[in-house]
Image (cartoon, grey):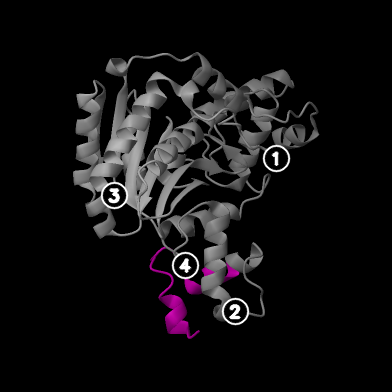
Amino acid sequence: MSAEEAAALIPNSEASLADVEMRLVRLGFLPPDLGLAGLSDAIVAFQSSRGIPETGDCDRITWRSLVEAGFAFGDRVLYLRNPSFRGEDVAWLQERLGNLGFDPGRVDGIFGTRTRDALQDFQSNVALPADGICGGATVDELRRVFGRSTEHIHGVRERQRLRVRTKPLSEASVAILAALPLEQQADLLAQRLRARGAKAVALADTDQSRLAAIVNTRELDLVTYFDFSTSGLQVAYYSGFRYTSPAGMLLAQMVADGLSHLELPVMISLRGMTLPILRETRMPAVSIAIDHPHRWLILGPEVVEAVAASIEEFLVNPESGTPGVGQPTVS
């Protein structure tokens, strides 16, 4: 592969070809002796490992994931700031706190207020200054302390809420989000849900993080996102950093099951991903993506009707989903 061809794989002004290559080598995805010849395959392998679209290009989502993957726990002091710290080190902190019984929210690798509060609780319990700053002494204590659980406290609580929740559809609020140009499909699903009695709003944007920030300001029961996939029809839920959202996984399984009954002329896959719309939203979220605009145009009405029925079932009777669904995978 020529340098010009390799550079075409990096449509992102934030990254340089040399930096992408160096990070992939350090993370073990690109053998040093292959160099540019193995760059495309290395990017795909990294994308697959991180649960992001396997395009083979180092787009903005991929580049930011590469940067985050380079931080090991203890490499830097972590605290609440704007913009938030993001990375593997934050995810390790959240995982460790949750397994010790201090709830930082789900493990998303983003240092927010819930992570700070859980960190302060931990610091108070081990007689450290409860300043919410994860520096040297706190890092050492987190590595030393015993009592590691096999389950994350947030996953346990999320599953419990699913078991006890009962809400009529007339009291449910849903956001239907979409990548451009899928506004029409999002509007149609919002209409179908409003006809069933739910409060539903449709929004479309090119930036998933911007959409997530908007819906996080609202009290919503769930989020659905329409997008384009790299192949077939993909139904995705949040899964990343050795954690899976129980509610998101249950919602996605119910949606995928509803779509499978349509006998669509396209392969349906169910997978955990770390797309920003799944990772950054604070409520259960599912992404539904089809690989071509023409397929969306032809299959859209059927897909929308099936998704509306699955959402209603999830909101009104989540226990009707597959038994055992939603067990978090924490290691």
Q: Residue, x 52% and y 65% (percent of image)?
A: 44
Q: Where is residue 112 shown, x and y percent of the image? A: 50, 33
Q: Quadrant of residue 326?
A: top right
- SS at circle 1: loop
Residue type (three-letter) at the residue carrying disc 3:
Ala
Task: Select label 2 or label 4 by which is in front.
Answer: 4
Q: CA distance from mark 4 to mark 3?
A: 20 Å
Task: Select label 3 or label 2 by which is in front.
Answer: 3
- From the viewer's perspective, tell me whether residue 281 is left or right of residue 149: left
Question: Residue 35 got which mark?
Answer: 2
Q: Where is residue 56 shown, x and y percent of the image? A: 47, 67
The residue wearing badge 1 is 331
- From the viewer's perspective, tell me whether residue 281 is left or right of residue 239: left
Give the magenta-colored segment's residue range. 1-22
- SS at circle 2: helix
Along the line of sight, the residue nearer the viewer: 127 or 85: 85
**Earlier sequence position, callout 4 versus callout 3:** 4
Q: Quadrant of residue 121?
A: top right
